[in-house]
Every structure is written in structure tokens, then in C-alpha cells.
Image (cartoon, rainbow, N blue to C red):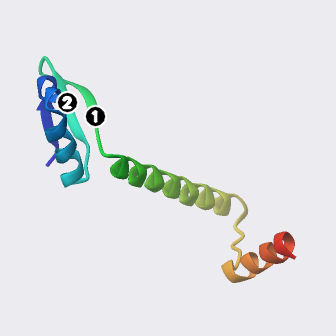
Amino acid sequence: MPQIRPITDLRNTTEISELCHAKNEPLFITKNGYGDLVIMSIETYEEMIETIRTDAAIYEAEKEYNINGVLLDARETLSLLKRKHFG
């Protein structure tokens, strides 16, 4: 369940920080009853960015496969890249 707090709770920075680190999820801040901000720990942010990058890479690979229908063997491709770039 998402954590939702009013903007006045931001006065207690230690509590807010502890909440963000304890739950590893965003904390939603409201202002006048409406969503205004999202706060999260750096670790949660980095995990979210890594997930987005991974999803984007998978999407691009699927799109490329749908266009040309060619699958490459991972071991062969990595071996080829190692030889090409590292001698």
C-alpha cells in the first residue's frame, strides 16, 4: 500500500528519511489534499532506473527481432565481441 503524507510532515526530515528507507518504495506527498511530490531513497531510485533500463533493452531486442527475425547465440556473440575488442 502506498505511503501518503501531507506536505507539513516534511518538517520532520528524519522521520521521512526513515520511512523512505524502511519501505523501499516512494512516499507520496500531498498538498491541499492533492498529489504534489514523490520522495524516495537513493537506493529505491537506482533500482527503479535499472529496471527501466533493463525493460528498455528487452523492448529494443524484441523490436529488432520482430523486424529481422534473427536471433544470435549469446556465447558466440560475446566471444566475437571479446576477440574484436580485446584481441
Could you tell me residue 52's position as x and y percent? 47, 51
Name the residue that disc number 1 marks. 38
Query: Would you place residue 17 above or below residue 78 in this image?
Result: above
The residue under the point 14% across, 49% down is 1
The residue under the point 67% across, 58% down is 64
Give amino acid for label 1: Val
Q: Nearest the camera: 51 or 27?
A: 27
Asked where in the image residue 68 lies, by quadrant, the reply is bottom right
Q: Are marks 1 and 2 in contact (CB under 8 Å)?
A: yes
Q: Nearest the camera: 6 or 10?
A: 10
Q: Is residue 72 left or right of residue 58?
A: right
Q: Nearest the camera: 49 or 13?
A: 13
- Residue count near mark 1 (Cα–Cα under 10 Å), binned few <14, some 14–19, many ≥20: few
The residue under the point 13% across, 32% down is 12
- Residue count near mark 2 (Cα–Cα under 10 Å), binned few <14, some 14–19, many ≥20: many
The Cα atoms of the two marked residues, 1 and 2, are separated by 6 Å
Query: Would you place residue 31 above or below residue 49 in this image?
Result: above
**Residue 29 shows which numbered tag?**
2
Query: Would you place residue 55 above or below residue 13 in this image?
Result: below
Which mark sits nearer the N-terminus, 1 or 2? 2
SS class of the residue under badge 2? strand
